[in-house]
Amino acid sequence: MTDKWLSKMLANRKENENAHSSFLKLKELLERDIAQLNDYIIELTTSHKTEIIPLVSQHIISSGGKRIRPLLTIACACALGYEGRDHTRLAVAVELIHTATLLHDDVIDESKVRRGKPTAHQIWDNKTSILVGDFLFSQAFMQMVKARSLQALDILSTTSAVISESEVWQLQLLHNIVGVSDDDYLQLIYSKTASLLAASCEVGAIIAGGTTTQIEAAREYGLNLGMAFQIVDDILDYIGDADKFGKKIGNDLIEGKVTLPIILAYNKLNPEQRGRMEEIFSGKTEITEAVKQEVITLVTSAEGFEAAYQVAEHYITKAISALQGLAKNRIAEELGNLAKETVERQN
Ligand code: IPE
Ligand code: IPE
Ligand code: MG
Ligand code: MG
Ligand code: MG
């Protein structure tokens, strides 16, 4: 039954591939602001001292990230009728924080592929990736200051600390399938991912001078979207298409990361199967292709992917309902569609 469900889900994704996505519609609606954002990104990744900074930055930036976070900042500001320029400074700040995080994350996760290309630390080295990441973080903070909103600065600096803290916490949770609960997992993904999507939306509403209700609605939308976004990322890490995902499939398993499909499946497996999962996630078993397939079969038999998708859907429903407090216009409507499409995303 589960196999059938999974095949249907994968087939649906293929059908949806050509759909005119909300991403494109939002980019059309916000064309002028996005163009400004792109100019800022180029400008802020230059250096007069060393060519390594633009080389590394351009390597990751031109590899084609989705730029969902700055799109959220701009969309939330414009949904509230903002006509100034400072939202693009905040948008570039969130994208640079994200890019810096990815440079660091790939070193920590020892990931070899990102956005369909070899990771920066594979081409250069760990030291270069970490330092260029730090440079991009600093550029992000300079842009936040230039946007002249102490409230936005407060939110984004707090979020940066929350992300770093969670990356350290995540290290402690590796290889512990018995000890990591679904609650731990949800707290972790809130900190490492949803907090930045929440902040991206929130600062957009703040810079636009939104009411407390609108600011809270924007945050609530981003937070719930972010939870679903990371859950789907963790599912795709097992059953995604490497070409579309732009990352190597199976990296989480190699790292011993205990993610939602694993937790939900583990709770339903029999003692013998649990024992095997404990062995596989212990860090002492070599993760071969056959072991990866074994995990996928076990998780599928316990409907772990299906159950994780259902949790993602739950967050999407919450995200969409939060939009009612933000605005009722084309942009808000497309933000709703963006949320719906997140569950079907392949990259
Ligand atoms: C990757 O984020 C990190 C996660 C939170 C899963 P994205 O999926 O937004 O990465 P890019 O920027 O589009 O490459
Ligand atoms: C996403 O973590 C959150 C951060 C990058 C902080 P992942 O480790 O799952 O992200 P990917 O899968 O490498 O993009
Ligand atoms: Mg990581
Ligand atoms: Mg990673
Ligand atoms: Mg991942």
Image (cartoon, grey):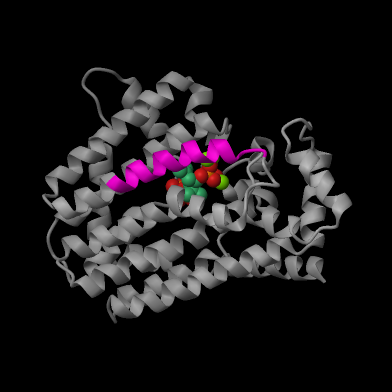
Judged left or right of residue 17, residue 154 is left
- Which residue is at the front of the view, 219 or 232? 219
Vertical side of 11 occupied by 299: above or below:
above
Q: Residue at point 41% right, 78% down?
A: 321
Residue 92 position in % (x across, y down): 27, 47
* Quadrant where the N terminus is found in the figure: bottom right
Q: Which residues are magenta?
A: 158-175
Judged left or right of residue 197, residue 82 is left
Q: Is residue 32 visible?
A: yes
Judged left or right of residue 3, residue 54 is left
The answer to which image quadrant residue 166 occupies is top left
Q: Residue at point 49% right, 25% down?
A: 121
Residue 25 position in % (x across, y down): 38, 68
Residue 255 position in % (x across, y down): 64, 36
Q: Is residue 61 visible?
A: no
Q: Residue at point 47% right, 22% down?
A: 126
Residue 55 part of the magenta-drawn span: no
Considering the whole magenta stretch, tell me its main secondary structure. helix
Q: Residue at point 70% right, 47% down?
A: 178
Vertical side of 315 occupied by 182: above or below:
above
Judged left or right of residue 115, residue 1 is right
